[in-house]
Amino acid sequence: MTERETPGNGAGAEGAGGGPDVDTKGRHAHIRDDEVEGLLDHIVRRGRPRLFRSVLELLASGIIAGIEIALGVLAYLAVKEATGSPLLAGIAFGVGFVILLLGNSELFTEGFLVPVTVVAAKEATWWRLVKFWLVTLVGNLIGAWGMMWLLMIGFPDLRHTAIDTGSTFAEAALTPETFVLSILAGSTMTLLTRMRMGTINDVARILASFVIGFIVAGMEMFHVILDTLFIFGGIHAGAEYDYGAWIAFFGWCTLGNIIGGLVLTTFMRLIRSHERLLEWRRKERPEPVRTNP
């Protein structure tokens, strides 16, 4: 039997139905989705400390993530050089997401679902969210630039492939098509965060990393951090495109990633568990959902 513990005067208070254990929609507690709402509790509790890190801690975590995801780019370039197939290379890129997962570092585009949920639950301020995004992004770019410089020195045979791959994004026109590809990339990356938070099975989380790596990198979606690494690699390898092309790509892609990550994935998830979210907003720390055998 499933038994739901509710926070004080939240879902356990008298609601629209006028009786105990009825929420604001008149639904009895035990017909609500404990799995979905329990996950929201988990996201808030796990995500809260991330928004209270110091600037130095956020910057270090962001730099580490930029360095680590570059190893996925290395795997991508090596497979693409050997096979000529971006689809096979996309599978190899999943290595980068696995390294991020096990290394517990932060990518900017992984910072939509969890931090926004924490702020929506009134467990942190919007200013902390903005600081988290900005510092993490700067750290990612620093780590990405430095690591791609080292990789292009250490693997000269991959320079041509790096230039060719980077040109796909640096020279792309700012069209509705590329903007949609950036929206899809943001949504897909946020879905990866949701899947990782939804299970404690490490095998499932690693499998999800490879699946999303294949979709985002293999299908050549426009992901602001991933594709920035490709562009930086090409620039370090002597490409004709320059940082001016990267800046245009960066602004276009960042906007699309944010829309995709927030609107298509994060906000929809919050709407799905809005009753539990309202309980968090009314009561600082609601009791967790418990399942009894």
Image: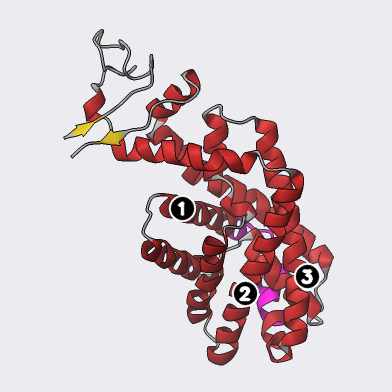
Q: Marks 1 and 3: in contact by CB < 8 Å?
A: no
Name which of mark 2 and mark 1 comes first in the sequence: 2
Residue appearing at x 80%, y 73% in the figure: 241
> Which residue position is annotated with label 2?
71
Marks 3, 1: nearer the viewer: 3
> Which residue position is annotated with label 3?
146
Q: Is residue 246 above or below residue 13?
A: below
Location of residue 6 in the rendering, given as x and y in whole percent from the top left corner: 34, 23
Q: In terms of image quadrants, where is residue 243?
A: bottom right
> Which residue position is annotated with label 1?
191
Q: Is residue 142 left or right of residue 108?
A: right
Q: Is residue 176 above or below residue 99?
A: above
Residue at the front extreme, as displayed: 293
Viewport quadrant of the C terminus:
top left
Distance (Cα) linking label 2 and label 1: 22 Å
Q: Nearer the viewer, residue 53 or 27?
A: 53
Name which of mark 2 and mark 3 comes first in the sequence: 2
Query: Which kind of residue does numbered mark 3 sit on?
Result: Gly
Q: Residues within 10 Å of mark 1 (few under 14, many from 20)?
A: many
Question: Is residue 171 something that shows in the picture?
Answer: no
Marks 2, 1: nearer the viewer: 2
Q: Residues within 10 Å of mark 2 (few under 14, many from 20)?
A: many
Name which of mark 3 and mark 1 comes first in the sequence: 3
Question: What stretch of residues is rendered in magenta?
Answer: 163-179
Residue appearing at x 65%, y 61% in the figure: 65
- Asked whether residue 168 is drawn in magenta, I would say yes
Query: Which kind of residue does numbered mark 1 sit on?
Result: Leu
Q: Is residue 38 above or below residue 142?
A: above
Distance (Cα) linking label 2 and label 3: 12 Å
Question: Is residue 237 something that shows in the picture?
Answer: yes
Q: In terms of image quadrants, where is residue 18?
A: top left
